[in-house]
Image (spheres, rainbow, N blue to C red):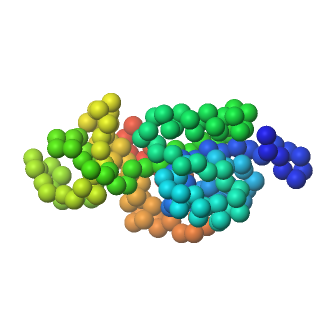
Amino acid sequence: MSVTTKGQRKRPAVITGVGSGLGRDIALGLVAKGYRVFGTAMSSEEIADLRKASDGAVNLSQCDIIDEAAVKAWANEVTIQDEGWIDLLISNAGILTPGPLDPGQRVAWVYTRGSYAEQIAITATSLVPVPDAIDDRTAASVMMQGLITSHLASEFYPVQPGDVAFVHGRRVGSVCC
């Protein structure tokens, strides 16, 4: 267990996808507020960068969230390091580039013209693979929630450094506060 200078237990926070962007910023912000942060990143370069930026305060592991065995191993590691106690869990990791796609593989996308057409031409980097366990309706709604959230946080009210944004998704759409 990690403690503060006043002898209090540091509150553990677990964040996936801390290697860049929003996840990285959240990790650094929580460290500044006295949390003990555990995070995953995809590359050793991202890990080195965040270790330097946090002065080693973020406990980092390289972990691909689509690899179930790697996720379980990371979760066990975090559980052991902080005695099974987690105050905050942020599932931030996302799949930005799908890598090679197989012919006929189910995919989802946003920001592309012709989405209602039977066939369209689109770059592979604009696609997100849809796992077999996720039905079409759920896959489409997840992508739409991301689109709505992005629009609300950039067009409706451009979020600026220092602003606090809370995004809550529920059944239909997202709510930004």
In the image, what residue occupies the spot 19% across and 57% down? 122
In the image, what residue occupies the spot 64% across and 37% down? 77
Where in the figure is residue 73, as x and y percent of width and height? 56, 35
- In the rendered structure, the answer to whether residue 147 lies left or right of residue 43 reads left
In the image, what residue occupies the spot 51% across and 65% down? 159
Q: Nearer the viewer, residue 152 or 48?
A: 48
Residue 129 occupies quadrant: top left
Residue 92 in view (yes/no):
no
Number of disc labels:
0
- In the rendered structure, the answer to whether residue 87 lies left or right of residue 45 reads right
Q: Nearer the viewer, residue 72 or 177?
A: 72
Where in the figure is residue 114, as x and y percent of width and height? 15, 56
List the single residue furthest toward the left: 118
Residue 77 in view (yes/no):
yes
Residue 132 occupies quadrant: top left
Q: Nearer the viewer, residue 177 or 113?
A: 113
Seen in the picture, residue 74 relative to 126 is either above or below; the reply is above
Quarter containing the N terminus: top right
Residue 135 occupies quadrant: top left
In the image, what residue occupies the spot 28% across and 57% down? 126
Q: Nearer the viewer, residue 72 or 164?
A: 72
List the single residue furthest toward the right: 6
Where in the figure is residue 35, as x and y percent of width and height? 72, 50
